[in-house]
Amino acid sequence: MQPIEVLYLESRPGSGRSAARRLKATGFDVRATALESLFDEIQSHPPDLVICELETASGAETLGTVKSLAPRIPVLVVGDKKAMALSREAMELGVCRFLTKPVRTADLELAVHQALQQPGRRDLERLEFANRQLSALNHASNRFSPIAIFRPP
């Protein structure tokens, strides 16, 4: 089984080294990159997950860029307490989870696994909802338009 590939988007060069080292120690394949290199990283070697380190100044813009470049790749956000103001916007943009620094390795590892399971759950929820809608339409259709049985004279 191949390791889970994580792309760690740093807010400042080198700021993700500690988290990347901790994730690598638990068995993940982690690459750190800056926002400027994100497009090339995703195009050349798409990760299983993106961890985005945020600061308040350009946080919403950064998240918008990440989600536009990788709409189907789950995204986790790591930020300080000041960046918590962006957590609502982050969730609206489709971010799986917002973690506040300092992040314990166990919490980060758990968040990664949960984020990777979410797309499957979302698809299942959508299918269940569509199934309920179709069942209701079928039931209504049967009530208002009974099938006429043709009987020859």
Image (cartoon, rainbow, N blue to C red):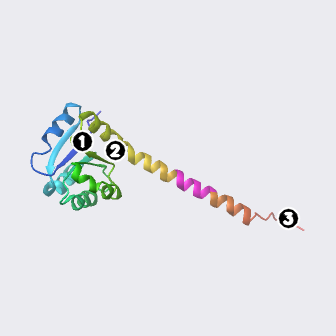
- The local crowd at label 2, few if under 14, some if 14 to 19, many if 20 or more residues have their Cα within 10 Å, is many
Q: Amino acid at mark 2?
A: Ala
Q: Is residue 24 above or below residue 78?
A: above
Q: Is residue 127 left or right of residue 106?
A: right
- Furthest residue toward left: 13
Does residue 153 belong to the magenta stretch?
no
Determine which quarter of the picture holds residue 110: top left
Total number of numbered discs in the rendering: 3
- In the figure, 99 relative to 89: above or below? above
Which residue bears the numbered disc 2?
115
Residue 140 x %, y %: 68, 62
What percent of the width, then of the height, locates residue 121? Answer: 44, 46
Tag 3 near tag 1, CB within 8 Å: no
Mark 3 or 2 closer to N-term?
2
User: Type of residue at label 3?
Assistant: Arg
Q: Tell me the tag on residue 151.
A: 3
Residue sticking out furthest to the bottom? 153
Between 138 and 132, the one nearer to me in the picture: 132
Q: Which residue is mark 1?
A: 5
Sooner in the amino-acid sequence: mark 3 or mark 1: 1
| Marks 1 and 2, how far apart at CA | 13 Å
In the picture provided, is 85 more to the left or to the right than 55? right
Q: Position of residue 53 (x, y in %)?
A: 20, 49
Q: Nearer the viewer, residue 146 or 93?
A: 93
Disc 3 from disc 1: Cα separation: 66 Å
Q: Residue at x 53, y 54 (%)?
A: 129
Quadrant location of the N terminus in the rendered image: top left
Write down the region rendered in magenta.
128-135
Q: Earlier in the sequence, mark 1 or mark 2?
A: 1
Residue depicted at 30% across the width and 51% down the height: 73
Residue 99 at x, y percent in the picture: 27, 45
